[in-house]
Image: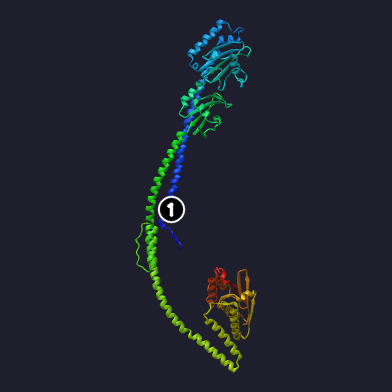
Amino acid sequence: MKIRRTKPTMKQQLFLFFMLAAVLVCLIFSAYYFVSEQRVLRNNLERENTKNLQYAIEKIEENAMRVEEFANQICQNGQIRALMLADDPFAPAETMAVASMLDEQFQFVTVTEDILSLYLIGENGLDIRRGKEAALVDRDAVYRAFCSDAFFADGGIACWGSGADNPCRFSQYETVLPYSRRIIDETTGRTAGYLVILLREAVLTNIGDALLGQKNTAFCLVDTTDSYVVRSDGWKRLSAHTEQDLRRMAMNEEHRLRDAPYQFFKRSSSVYDWCIVEAVSTYEFAQQRSILLQAFVVVGALALLLALILASVFAERLVQPIRSMADAVDRIAQGQFDCALPRDSVQEYARLEQGIEQMQDDIRALLDSRVQQEKEKRKAEVRMLRAQINPHFIYNTLNSIKMMAVMQGSRGIQNMTEALGSILRSSLSKAEEQITLREELALLEQYIYIQNIRYKGNIEYEVDVQDESLIDLRLQRFLLQPLIENAILHGIEAAPHHGGTIRLTAWREKREIYISVEDDGAGIPPEILQRLQRHEQVTQGSIGVHNVDERLRMLYGKDCGLSFESEEHVRTCVTVHLREMGESK
């Protein structure tokens, strides 16, 4: 059993269209606002962290400069310089004075709180130490680690080192932040000794923790060789849970560490060759993004629900007038012509309703007119049947004349009567609307025969069918006879010698068929020729030719029909352009 599918109604299509439009608009605006809000959140995160990083790096620079100021005070001390240059650096009085000075500094300078050990190491063997871990460290180990040319790789006087292992094995701090400064003999320019300060990393990380130490935040300070200067405890914990090198993370790029999303930010120091790197957990940002997405989903669902209601209302409002008009058209199709439609407030609907009522009135008038035409047609058929008596009477009379001519031996009268009878019989026939070119040429032979009796045989008639397949070409009955008649009446008869030649030529060019009728008679005056070439009807005797032209253009297309060539007092050529019926446009 074949299932018949019903076509969707206009209301269904409008409803679907409105819903699709609403869904598309909701999706576009939701996506736009979601992306915009997400970008705002991300920009706020980046702006806030960039500002904090800048403030943190400035404070770290201030602390580092305090350490350097403290170092400058020590290195500029005359007693210390004198001990560095003395042949006997262990003189009790001078050594005790320097030790007291250092004790005083450690007591009043706040930066000394983060100094684990301080060493004054002279090339002459001087070794003065201060700090709670200084006595537990071997002098040579400090000298090799922090006074060598490798440590002062840049060739400067003072140098901050990267985070190094604490040389004191009994310390609670595994790593220290070293600062070393050369003490130069101004007389000779040679290095007289070194001031080495080993600080807790907290001297710099405490500042970062205070400014950046938010929950799930970690930072580090790296130098130009990507070596750690200091690391926060959060950075150390984060590094312990990943095999990735956190220092090489791209800025503003999100990574997952410890199954949590992190964003990395960097800021370079304007004073030191340091760069602070911060790893910020974006878990809260992801939560905000999730909440934002949920909010947009809820708003989108509510918008779609509202769109569903509005689409149903609008679709019904738009379809109701059309449904009324469709019902009216159905009633008109059933023969009810008394439909009255209310005028809708929408201009287009009102025009349609007015048009349907006008169509209803026109159909009623057309039906009344058709009934009247049928009555007139029946009357005309009766008159036509009566009128056919005369042509048949003439045809029967001609047969009687032919029989008398046979009995009396008048061969010429017999032939003329037979020719006229053939033409008359063809004109009365209704069995076929079309005949072949062969049959049309046979009728033209009969017509020329009759005309030659009138013109005493002065008409020569030639036929040239260049393509034999054209003999069976089907064309309209009496299509060529008006052209031959025109050639005789307006060409040969109008010529001074009252005689001439008519040449009929038929040929084919690809799918186009041409039949020309040419005579050497009087020709056509130029003004009449121009009107004929414009397919206009010429008054004097041109009704038949114009009729042929109209028939051809109606059957085969506007580019077919008759074309005229004429040279006055020399020749006239009328060419029929047509196609086989299967090729008509």
Residue 535 appears left or right of 2: right
Residue 320 appears left or right of 193: left
Residue 190 appears left or right of 328: right
Which of the pair 71/531 is nearer the observer? 71
**For residue 478, above or below residue 194:** below
**For residue 404, above or below residue 137:** below
Which of the pair 379/316 is nearer the observer? 316
x, y percent for residue 272: 55, 23
Tell me where residue 439 sits by quadrant. bottom right
x, y percent for residue 473: 59, 75
**For residue 215, above or below residue 347:** above
Residue that carries the numbered disc 1 in the rendered image: 17
Residue 92 appears left or right of 17: right
Q: Is residue 567 visible?
A: no
x, y percent for residue 507: 63, 73
What's under tag 1, amino acid-wise?
A: Phe
Q: Is residue 340 visible?
A: yes
Mark 1 neighbour class, 10 Å CA radius: few under 14, some 14 to 19, many 20 or more? some
**Dividing the image into 4 quarters, which one contains the C terminus?**
bottom right
x, y percent for residue 446: 59, 83
Which of the pair 433/366 is nearer the observer? 433
Q: Residue at x 43, y 53 (%)?
A: 17
Tell me where residue 569 sits by quadrant. bottom right
Q: Residue at x 58, y 5 (%)?
A: 91
Q: Report the residue that reaches farthest toward the bottom.
A: 408
**For residue 17, above or below residue 173:** below
